[in-house]
Image: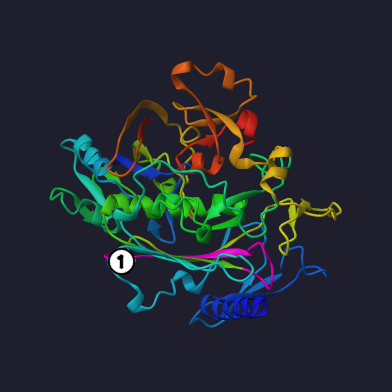
Amino acid sequence: MKKITVAVVLDDNEGMLLFGKRQSRDRVMIAEFVESAGSSPIYVSDFSKILFESYDSVNMCKNPLEEAPDGAVCFIENYSLSPYLDIIDTLIIYRWNRLYHSDVKFDVNVKNAGYKLVSTAEYVGSSHDKITKEIYKK
Amino acid sequence: MKHNFVKALLSLFVILSLLFGIASCVPADESGKTGGYESIELKLDGVDPITVPGFSGTEFYILNNNQPFFEDDEIVTESYEKYYPLDALGRCTLTIACIGKDLMPTEDRGDIASVKPSGWVQAKYDTAVISGGYLYNRSHLIGFQLTGENDNEENLITGTRFMNEAMIPFENQIADYIKETDNHVMYRVTPIFVGNDLVAAGVVMEAYSVEDKGDGISFNVFLYNNQPGITIDYLTGKSWLSGEAPDNSESDSSDENDINNGNNAEGQTYILNTSSKLIHESTCGNAAKISDKNREEYTGDINSLIEDGYKEAGCCLGK
């Protein structure tokens, strides 16, 4: 079975989307995500294409959770993760530290799913005062 | 002379009502004054009437399949902001803006306590009923973080805590989008008053990101100016706990009365933890434990703090 790393971005209410649109975006956060992936292949969905237009090495596909190969790093905005927890061995949660409305929320209880927090970092984004990055591993 | 002045005011009211939208409603009770409308009919300029269902506990109702009502010639790429005059009853009528980075505030928020919007009868309840205790906020139609308007009476309505908190996440989304992209967002906020009510039944918020044709931001919602657990007399602004008898004493919305009763939300002092970004009541035991380095005293509107990213501490402010 393949194992992948998945990153998501959440607001204060674990929200991901509102009205089919992302809640927010941040260039510095995206740059940090790409850089931290290192040499691992990055897969994102067509929905996220606009965020990665300046990165040639990023692979676009319909559903990265299905199509990404073993060892890939995926950035997920518009898919439920719960059906894929068996293959997600590392979960990265970026937090906006901001309140937006949402009608799609993160559907994983990280503790119940067997993930353990291994690191936390904070940095200033391009349009967000404080972005928190949490890394969880099984 | 006086008669002519009144006549002119009434004419202005009629014109503004036709231009900017009025509302009719089906009251939920016989008095027709206590809010809780079973439905609200929106009559917005250039739009067929829309019936919005009454408040059921959710914060907002999506209008027009979430497509804003902006006409093509209203969508522009140069920043501007416009606040329309109060009507004859002293009520806000309409605000519209094309918001760009150049309109966003560069200075701290100022004092808005001098403005007394229509229907301003402040009341304090147990924090178990309303987080923070106070029913009303001076709610900016166009939020301070978007255009930097402070005490503009044409931009401030009497809004419940519930509605104000529902407006902020939409404003956050717009503000952060503009900061990130340097694009513009068309934004219109229309308060909806039923009949001669002094307190709005709600507001219509429309937003549309211009340069990417709504790809980043596009919504059209009605936000309810209700407060769970509280019944509001929208005609006057008076309020009481739902299920209890209304207070029929003469209302007094003077600032002096607010202050004497400790009801001046804008004048309340809080203790802030600048590190955890938590707001405490000044008498909270946990506030005393905050280190000097992270401790700050603040007197003013708690919503200003919330818009700046602070949260109410669960130990004292009930959230």
Compared to residue B162, the image places residue B41 above or below, namely: below
CA neighbours of label 1 inside 10 A, class few (<14), some (14 to 19), many (20+): many
- Tell me if residue B138 can be seen: yes
- Give the answer, above or below, for where B133 lies relative to B147: above
**Mostly what secondary structure, the magenta segment?**
loop
Outermost left residue: A56
Where is residue B282 shown, x and y percent of the image? 61, 26
* Residue receiving disc 1: B210
Residue nearest the observer in this picture, A61 or A24: A24
- Residue B279 in the image, given as x and y percentages of width and height: 55, 32
The residue positioned farthest toward the front in the image shown: B1
Left or right relative to B179: residue B239:
right
In front: A36, or B23? B23
Q: In which quarter of the image is the C terminus of chain A?
A: top left
Residue occupying image coordinates x 51% and y 43%: B111
Question: Which element is circle 1 on?
Answer: loop
Q: What residue type is labelled 1?
A: Val
Q: Which residue is drawn at 37% across and 52% down?
A: B175
Residue B194 lies in the magenta-colored region: yes
At 51% from the left edge and 79% from the top edge, which residue is drawn?
B19
Query: In the figure, B161 relative to B126: above or below?
Result: below
Q: In which quarter of the image is residue B12?
A: bottom right
Residue B122, how many percent across, how many down?
Answer: 69, 48
Q: Which region of the structure is painted magenta?
A: B193-213
Relative image position of residue A18 (x, y in whole percent):
44, 57
Magenta stretch contains residue B48: no
Chain ID of residue with mark 1: B
Q: Is residue B42 visible?
A: no
Q: B32 and B263: which one is in front?
A: B263
Q: How is the image coloured?
A: rainbow
Quarter of the image for the N terminus of chain A: give it: top left
* Residue B104 vertical position relative to residue B69 in the rendered view, above or below: above
